[in-house]
Image: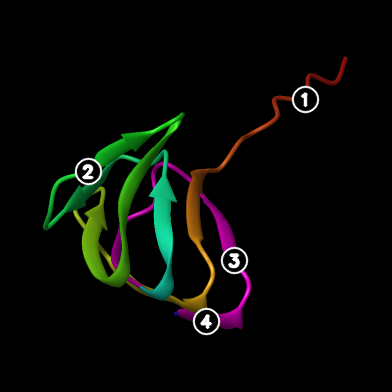
């Protein structure tokens, strides 16, 4: 699967149990996440998200890898966030 934008940020919520091979690319932007992604290079912390990189390619795996996901932005940041589940208890 590929998600791309020219001008604008990409903000994705991904379930924490997903098995994904990630290819992330920005030309003029940065990449942030709160997911536990195994990267080919080190993470840096930025507020409550990890800074993964920017202005280039970043590759990593979520839960050992699986489905290939390519996310690309020319002018904008990429945010990969944990999918938040709401537990609705119906009486």
Badge nearest the viewer, 2 or 4:
2
- As helix, strand or loop, the secondary structure at mark 4 comes to strand
Q: Residues within 10 Å of mark 2 (few under 14, many from 20)?
A: some
Mark carried by residue 29: none
Q: Is residue 23 magenta?
A: yes
Which residue is farthest front?
A: 28
Q: Nearer the viewer, residue 66 or 14?
A: 14
Mark carried by residue 4: 4
Q: Which residue is mark 2?
A: 43
Q: Which residue is mark 1?
A: 88
Q: Which residue is mark 3?
A: 9
State the extent of the magenta-drawn residues as a range: 2-25
- As helix, strand or loop, the secondary structure at mark 2 comes to loop
- As helix, strand or loop, the secondary structure at mark 1 comes to loop
Picture quarter with the C terminus: top right
Q: Residues within 10 Å of mark 1 (few under 14, many from 20)?
A: few
Badge nearest the viewer, 3 or 4:
3
| Residue drawn at point x = 56 percent, y = 42 percent | 83
């Amino acid at each position: 699967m590929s998600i791309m934008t020219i001008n604008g940020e990409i903000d994705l919520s991904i379930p924490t149990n997903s098995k994904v091979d990630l290819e992330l690319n920005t030309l003029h932007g940065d990449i942030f996440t709160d997911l536990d992604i195994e990267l080919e290079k080190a993470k840096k912390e930025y507020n409550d998200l990890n800074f993964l990189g920017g202005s280039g390619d970043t590759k990593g795996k979520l839960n050992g890898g699986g489905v290939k996901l390519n996310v690309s932005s020319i002018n904008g940041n990429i945010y990969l966030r944990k999918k938040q589940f709401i537990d609705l208890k119906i009486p």
